[in-house]
Image (cartoon, rainbow, N blue to C red):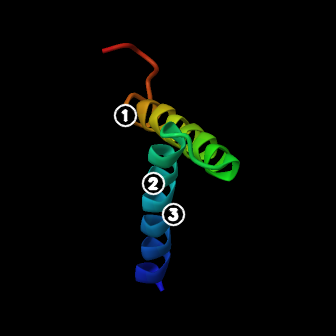
Amino acid sequence: MMVLALSCILVLTIGGCACVWWAARGGPRWTRAVSAATLAAGELTRLASRYDRNPSGADD
């Protein structure tokens, strides 16, 4: 079951990256929407991992 969940996440990630690439080259409108969602999810993930690495809140 865990392999299935991770496989789905991998497929969604690859699909999102493909939409970012396609939208940057003038793809259809739906690719721009998926691209924006992918970039927002990546930014949220980056911010969440930043707080996980430094739970005290002090700067390195």
- Whichever of callouts 2 and 3 sits on the residue coming sooner in the sequence is 3
Label 2, secondary structure: give it. helix
Q: Are marks 1 and 2 in contact (CB under 8 Å)?
A: no
Q: Are marks 1 and 3 in contact (CB under 8 Å)?
A: no
Select label 1 or label 2 by which is in front: 2
Taking depth in this image into account, of 31 and 49 the one nearest to the observer is: 31
Three-letter amino acid code of the residue under disc 1:
Arg
Select label 1 or label 3 by which is in front: 3
* Left or right of residue 36, residue 5 in this image: left
Q: Which residue is mark 2?
A: 18
Label 3, secondary structure: give it. helix
Which residue, as the protein is rendered here, is positioned at the far bottom? 1
Local packing at callout 3 (Cα closer than 10 Å; few below 14, some 14-19, many 20+) is few
Q: Which residue is found at the position 46% from the left and 20% from the top?
A: 57
* Left or right of residue 32, residue 10 in this image: left
Q: Which residue is mark 3?
A: 12
Compared to residue 57, the image places residue 8 above or below, namely below
Q: CA distance from mark 1 to mark 2?
A: 29 Å
Taking depth in this image into account, of 21 and 46 the one nearest to the observer is: 21
- Residue 59, percent across and down? 37, 13
Q: Which residue is found at the position 49% from the left and 61% from the top?
A: 15
Local packing at callout 1 (Cα closer than 10 Å; few below 14, some 14-19, many 20+) is few
Q: CA distance from mark 1 to mark 3?
A: 25 Å
Compared to residue 11, the image places residue 40 above or below, namely above
